[in-house]
Image: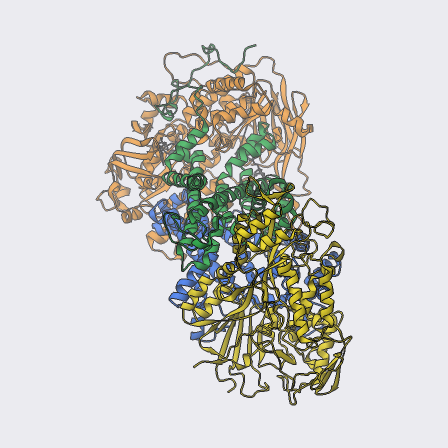
Chain colours: A green, B orange, C blue, D yellow
Amino acid sequence: MTDPLVPDSTPPQGQPAPLTGQTPADRAAMPLADPAGAATDQRSQWRDVWAQFRRHRGAMVALMVFLLILLFVLAGPWLWSLDATFVDIRARNKGPSWAHPLGTDQLGRDTLARLMIGGRTSIAVGMTAMIIAVMLGSLIGILAGFYRRLDAPLSRLIELFLALPLLPLLLLMVTLFREPLAKNFGAGPGTFLLIVVAIGATSWMQAARIVRGDVLGLKEREFILAARSIGTPSGRMMRRHVLPNVLSPIMVAATLGIASAIITESALSFLGLGFPPDFPTWGRLLFDAIPQMQNYPMRVVLPGALISLTVLTVNYIGDGLRDALDPRIRGR
Amino acid sequence: MLDDAAAPVGAAPLVSIDGLRVSFQTREGRVAGVNEISFDIRPGECVCVVGESGSGKSVTSLSLMRLVEYGGGQIERGAMLFDRGDGRPVDLARQSDATMRDVRGNRIGMIFQEPMTSLNPVFTIGDQLAESLIVHRGMTRAQARARALALLREVRIPEPERRLDQYPHELSGGMRQRVVIAMAMACEPRLLICDEPTTALDVTIQAEILALINRLKREKRMAVLFITHDMAVVAQMADRVVVMLRGDKVEEGPVEQIFESPREDYTKALLAAVPRLGEMEGTDAPVPLRLMRGASAAEPRPIVVEDPQPLLEVRDLCTRFAVKGGLLRRTVAQVHAVEDVSFTLNGGETLSLVGESGCGKSTCGRSILRLVEPTSGSVRLGGTDVLALSSGQLRRARQDMQMIFQDPFASLDPQMRLFDQIEEPMLNYGIGSRTERADRIAALFDRVELPRSFMRRYPHEMSGGQRQRIAIARALALRPRLIIADEAVSALDVSVQAQVLNLLMELQQDMGISMLFISHDMAVVERVSHHVAVMYLGRIVEIGTRRQVFENPQHSYTRQLMAAVPVADPRQKKISEDLNFKPIPSPIHPLGYQPPRSTYREVAPGHRVMVEPVTHG
Amino acid sequence: MLTYTLRRIALAIPSLIFISLVIFLLLELSPGDPLGNVPLTVPPEVKAKMREALGLGQAWYIRYVLWLKQFFWIEPMHWVDQWLGTSIVEGQQRIISFQSRVPVFDVIAQRIPQTLIVVGFSYLVGVLIAIPIGIYSAYRQYSWFDQLGTFLSMVGFSMPTFFTGVVLIIIFAVNLQWFPSVYDTTLHVTDWPSFWKQVRQMVMPVTVLSLYNAAQISRFMRASMLDNLRQDYVRTARAKGLAERTVVLKHVLRNSLIPVVTVIALGLPSVFGGAIITEQVFRVNGLGQLLISAIQANDIPMVLTLTFIFAILIVAFTLIADLLYGVLDPRIRYD
Amino acid sequence: ERGTDGQVKILYSQAVSTMNGYMSGGTKDIEVGSLVLEPLAGFDEKGNIIPRLVSEIPSIENGGISADRTSITWKIKPDMKWSDGTPFTSEDVKFTADYCMHPEGGCAQLARYEGIKSVEAVDPLTVKVTFDKAQANPFTAFVGSTSPILQKAQFQNCLGTAASTCTEQNTKPIGTGPFRVTDFKVNDVVMLEANPNYRDPAKPAFATAMVKGGGDSESATRAVMETGEFDYAWNTQVNPELQEQMKAGGKGVFEVAFGTLVERIELNQTDPSSDLPEGERGTAKHPHPFFSDPKVRQAMSMALDRQALSDIGYGEAGRPTCDLVPAPEAYAAKNTSCLTQDIEGAKKLLDEAGWTVGADGIREKDGRKLKVLFQSSVNPVRQEFQSIIKQWWSEIGVDTELKQVDGSVFFGADAGSPDTVQKFYADVQMYANNFDGTDPQPYLAQWTCDKAPTPANQWQGENYVRYCDKAYDEGVMQMLSEVDGAKRGELAKKLNNMITVDSNVNLPLIDRGRFSARSNTLGGVVMNVWDTELWNASDWFRVK
Ligand SMILES: Nc1ncnc2c1ncn2[C@@H]1O[C@H](COP(=O)(O)OP(=O)(O)OP(=O)(O)O)[C@@H](O)[C@H]1O
Ligand SMILES: Nc1ncnc2c1ncn2[C@@H]1O[C@H](COP(=O)(O)OP(=O)(O)OP(=O)(O)O)[C@@H](O)[C@H]1O
Ligand SMILES: [Mg+2]
Ligand SMILES: [Mg+2]
């Protein structure tokens, strides 16, 4: 049986050809460079996104800087082999020198090495916690917005989490999970897991609220109805139709999330809930240096600048990505 | 304005556009929105600009207001001489912003293409009307309010006093459009620009508005620049016509000349694409339009179904929406959107649903697919009772019935490539392997005559007509037996509309698809349907074969609809200025309300007209 | 709208009680001891007695129900007694802080003025500077002003207040000696000199906090303005011949404010929550400092009451935000 | 002249919760409370008992203390008045004892009233305290700022469970001290004014006082030493560099005095391994795998450079020590053996004991590695110490994992929490402790076997290291009944040495002084470690 949808190579008798073969609009709409009719051209969607992203000057510069920061914290310790936790009380509070290009801190530890190692933790915590928070927030936001039945309970959940005092919650989490985690994953990874989960689990509410609002509006859009009419099941509906359309607020939440995660981490270690004391992170370096700000200003400036720079670059990358992911902007 | 009133035709032009060129900065570099265009408008004259979508009509008008700059455009060349009333024309292209502010709203009024969105949603009608009066005429608030009231009276809005304090969303589409017109008219401009003011409206409201513009033109000696793609409206409104194609003027002339002896092929093609009411008189089966094309002209075949079998049987369908209120969110009233509707659609045939905006056409179509849950009644599709299906079965049943939505742009996911959008229904039902699906999508693209290279585009990268074709391709992907086409062509310009109509009919012919065709355009309905049902206030007031209903309309509402249809013939101007349709009664009834059953009178075999209840006339 | 509001309020009560239970259990389960701050020199037996005197000997559910009764009956009635001179709940125990043995509500009442003045005022200032910045950055998107705004707000957001606060103190209190570094909560504004004193002591905490708030809100404002500047009605407004100022500040702003106002409303409960770190740095000793010191001292009645009031505010302001939406946007109706 | 010097502004980095120290036990509350409430007798800066409300200090010689040491009789100064003008009588003293000893009152200073059989108001100016048995040190109740006298008239309805409802009384007690409360903002600020009925008509020199609370010690120090906004800041514990910088500000000076507060490291004598079942973990049933080896303990101590720690962490505010009882003079053993760091010696010691260095640089013996978990409370100085000490220990081949715990959890006695100082689920912990008053006996009694926290006593003991030595227990018993001053001193030194330099179970690090900042314009301040810092606030004056 022949497929009635596939026309024979010659149109069937009496089938009217269109107005002038092709409307002028069609022709106008086709870029000249485009190899017409090339169905084989499967240029990936991501290449479009990348192409558009490259156009965003701020985002590109930010990406470069961000990569440099990553290089600094990841490859840096390879090149600069001083131990970030090596205490040398004879070399306390030294200024920049060949042995210590950025000087040493109050215990004679090398500032450069500490910044590099600290950055690893801070960026990893910031990113992971942000991802957890954003994923949790988006999931709950989408579910609350999409299913009318879930809206009220999930909204109450959001309110509950907003109202919960964080400190006791974190203390409880630490008490319950610190030892089992340390046992199963080792002290470092265990604490890392605990911290990112703790930060993630207590900072998803903003994102959820924003996403829920957007989904509520989106749900009334006709293409959702259209998707239902072509038999799209709910799961796929949320994945393919809802999620991509609420990406923009999620991106904003993500950018802000990294900044607060890095800061929160330092606050946590100051409450005894974070990494062990000999574990440098940018937030902690900043915090530790504040009392000595007047004598050794570089000690606050360096970690502070690195945190700001990271957040700033992530923000610009987020801006660029948001523009690039939006096909309406990409078309322009 | 004495000189205007006395100005004979052929007097000094009010506006004279000369060699205008407008370009936009885009990703692909500078593109021209308008290439090179020149024409004049004289006082008291209506110049219609026609042309397909994207030909530069809106850009031209926006350039006149110098608003095109705000959209990223740039006037590269040309002059736009405008007589501000002192006899010394100034070149608008070169005026300062301050001068332009004086021109805008004061000397030139503009009605925008999208009436629904061009009012600010958070200010009252009165505020928005008063604004330009306060700015240009230096009126006090009270004076401006009084004048706004007078303006609303002038555009014949019912209960104008009440409207002043209402917000735009509280008005119906037609009223909003009239507010926009009143706003454009507020300072009695010398030139009124109307950019497709009626495209989104149904015929009755359209007729009202056209009449209004006509009256103002005559009474105030106002010049009108009327932009539209609807040739019937052109015929009714224009003194002169400018035809545009891809940024250039291709032809210009008095309306009779353009309609009767067009010179350019493009104009001819445009005219040929216009469905005219009454063209099908005397025939039974729908026939695809005959389009102007190159050498290979073939005679369109009528779509005749031998021995039609009922496919879709709708009986006593009622759909009501709850109006909730009170402390416990109880339903306090109901919108009787579809009330007691029964009809039968035969396999391979088309039944059209026509009626006023808000009469329940879309709801009826959606109820059949159970995209909204009907309150009662029965829907049988080829023997299965659709309303009794479980949600899993319903999903499977939808494979057989597909819908083309009223708004093609809204019903496509803006974030998804066209390929994925068409693939989705097949994915949902697990049809075919990856390559098979790709093949079928390619075939569908061919079928709806879209280049395959469009597959990786996004909806916004398409023109309206192309989007509509994507929606059609998506509906066809599952090879359904029934398609519900909800205003599938209303938003398209004539040439594209003709193509889409032909495509649908062609597919019907080839694949034996049945169609429920929902539309407010009577000429189109006449062209495509085997049967016609006229809806009014949720009920079918008249149903029969197309020939029965069109050649022998019985119900008063059907007649009114027919009367409101503009005729694409400049010698047959029938826009009456005294059209004043009654507003539709409210379909909202309290909870316990028992609607009376519809009773019909059989005029001829299959041609039934409602006698009870009397809701219209 | 009234019925909608009433219905939401009616539904909020059970969910609030649930929230209070969760908070209570959380405080119960989390480690820490109300007597953690008692010196180690106090022997364990004495500590055990002290614990009993705090009522910690009873089962948790009894204490929870007691708290509910105190919160919902005794405290309100206590105020009634005070106003009307009646004695409905005389002699019944109010909610008493573990730490200070002072009725929790009295302490909260003491703290509210400075919190409202400092934190509330900085929120106000933050909003007032964020809105114009947001408007202008959006109107001139990608201009140098916009870029600078983005830069500053990101730096402002990523710099913790414990850092900016100390920087300000070192510059303006230590080196320049312009402003005091310690906030005097006992100051009563009675005349110009005391008013001036109040202004001076507010400058630094308000600066720190409002920068932080402004950084966030200006982002929202900018995004919202960008959305609305592309709308059709803006073109209509221009076509009427309105000045650019009027177009932006009247037509666009009014619409853009709709989502921003709700964001602002949703942020308001945090004013009551106080600013933990900033209050600490400048010793404003408002509600934030109260909460954190209560948490550190495991002062369960205080923490529970404070967070519960906070929860009420969150629920209330969520409702207010929803209602505001309806008021500002005539298209939205609640019925 | 009273009230001529304006206002004195005092800054406490911990805010005051109540003026009634019996209700809280917090040092800050007791100290600030002492501006208003006074005991019968106090201590001067040398630790001598001085009369406050009594005409003389009772002794066996003057008959104040009974020969069998079972009772003590106080003679109140005549014409003493409360700040409300009513006379101060022996009834008030007796009432105070009833108040604190009430079984339901939850009095924080109950320990001061331990062993009291009765308190009698013999006549309006005579109070007799009778004990259950002979007391070597009868100066417990009514002596020192931790047991001040409350006014009976004001507090008589506040006994037992009613104690906590007496808000007005607790925040604005009527006292005999130099000041009285005019305004009390909980955990924020206390405003006071000179007591018009103070016994010395010329004092206090200040008309009003303000005690502000909150914030951190750095900014508190700054407010006195750099901005000059305050006259006195309590406990200005900042790092030495900052101390120097602050001093350079020239607006004030630091006041320091050394008492009994010792920062120490404890080496767990039981096995804290989480592999052990709950209930056996951290109990005497499982001795510590390597800290039961005295050589390891000694090596751990030898690796420390206490002088360096003191210089880095405390500067003027600390001095290295080897004793848990560094003062008073009569009891201080003054060991110096631990003061010099000896890394090489420590290594040799470990080698001798059979702990050999493994491939990873960590010593091991019989498959046991010298890996320790080192916990401490959150505090910048402690975290620095942890890092430094980790370094030193790594040099002798001991691997250290660091852990910090929030103070309220660490020092809280929550039996459910694994992170308390009592449970000591770590190998090493560091904190500071001191003893109340001048008598070390109850303090030394903390290391007896039965004081070890165990699951059986809900982990409520003070012998956190789980030290257990019969000889030590006997020594404690002996000291309890010993009344002779010199012999008590010897005993105390012996006991101190047993738990420190002899066994190295406790590694004392630093003798931490009281360290506060005073503005140059504030005169009369005498730092006192045996009583409150504000003990002589009545003598304070403005330097003109
Ligand atoms: N802001 C813009 N940026 C880039 N190109 C634009 C812009 N506005 C219009 N154009 C282009 O200018 C051309 C003319 O557009 P215009 O809006 O005038 O069409 P039109 O004739 O009004 O069509 P329609 O009937 O669809 O309204 C089109 O090709 C369009 O793509
Ligand atoms: N979800 C809904 N809730 C409440 N009322 C609704 C809903 N959908 C439609 N209505 C009401 O039902 C009636 C019929 O609407 P419907 O959309 O079917 O009209 P229509 O004939 O398709 O009009 P148009 O030509 O404007 O598309 C209208 O009064 C409308 O206000
Ligand atoms: Mg247009
Ligand atoms: Mg419709």
The x, y position of residue D321, in whole percent, is 56, 63
Question: How many numbered discs?
Answer: 0
Q: Quadrant of residue D183?
A: bottom right
Instruction: Return the x and y of residue D116 as percentages of the image width and height.
Output: 75, 75
Relative to D126, is C199 on the left or the right?
Answer: left
Instruction: Inspect this view and state whether residue A159 appears.
Output: no
Residue C53 vs B222, above or below: the answer is: below
Q: Nearer the viewer, residue B176 or D266?
A: D266
Q: From this viewpoint, which residue is outermost toward the bottom?
A: D79
Can you say which quadrant of the picture contains the C terminus of chain B?
A: top right
Q: Relative to B579, is C320 on the left or the right?
A: right
Q: Residue at x 75, y 80 (%)?
A: D71
Identify whether D345 is placed above or below B243.
below
Could you tell me residue A293's position as x and y percent? Answer: 42, 58
Choose between C297 and D440: the one closer to the eye. D440
Q: In the visual, does A39 lie left or right of B246?
A: right
Q: Residue furthest left?
A: B88
Rendered position, D484 above or below D62: above
Q: Name which quarter of the figure residue B388 lies in.
A: top right
Residue D49: % across, % down: 63, 79
Looking at this view, is C259 or A261 the one in front? A261
Specify whether residue D322 is in view: yes
Instruction: Tell me where residue B400 sits by quadrant.
Output: top right
